[in-house]
Amino acid sequence: MPTHASAAKRLRQSEKLRQRNRTSRSQIRTLTKKIRLEPAADEAPELLKEVSILLDRFASRHLHHQNKANRLKSNLTRLVNSARQT
């Protein structure tokens, strides 16, 4: 346990932030999993758009690195486009 008041406050803040980041990461993982399981589905382009928006938002908050967000968007877009062509 922290011995200083500032350390206790920092512990509370970091726990709150950790929980918020955890739900955000879970949301991204769930949506990407839906796209990867059914890339040819009718709702895949809408999910892809939603994931792209979320990844940009999380990258701006430093939850993901910008390059990682771009890489995920690129890979998912490529997957959906190739599945829709066949």
Image (cartoon, grey):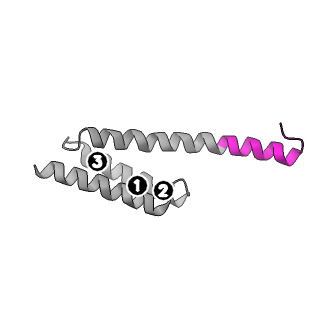
Q: The N terminus lies in which quarter of the figure?
A: top right
Residue at 30% from the left image edge and 52% from the top image edge: 76
Amino acid type of the residue that numbered disc 1 sits on in the rendered structure: Ile
Q: Position of residue 12 (x, y in %)?
A: 75, 41
The segment highlighted magenta reads 1-16
Amino acid type of the residue that numbered disc 2 sits on in the rendered structure: Arg
How busy is the neighbourhood of tag 3: few (under 14 within 10 Å), some, or many (20 plus)?
A: few
Q: Which residue is mark 1?
A: 53
Q: Residue furthest bottom?
A: 67
Location of residue 16 with respect to 57 vertically, above or below? above
Q: Position of residue 46 (x, y in %)?
A: 28, 47
- Tell me, for residue 46, which label it has, or none: 3
Cα gap from disc 1 to disc 3, whole angstroms: 11 Å
Q: Tag 2 or tag 3, which sits nearer the N-term?
A: 3
**Drawn side of residue 46 relative to residue 12, left or right:** left
Residue at 47% from the left image edge and 62% from the top image edge: 66
Label 1: which secondary element: helix
**Drawn side of residue 61 relative to residue 16, left or right:** left
Amino acid type of the residue that numbered disc 3 sits on in the rendered structure: Glu
Q: Which residue is mark 2?
A: 57
Q: Quadrant of residue 36?
A: top left
In the image shown, does 16 or 64 lie closer to the viewer? 64
- For the image, the number of numbered tags is 3
Q: Position of residue 31 (x, y in %)?
A: 37, 42
Label 2: which secondary element: helix
Residue at 25% from the left image edge and 49% from the top image edge: 45
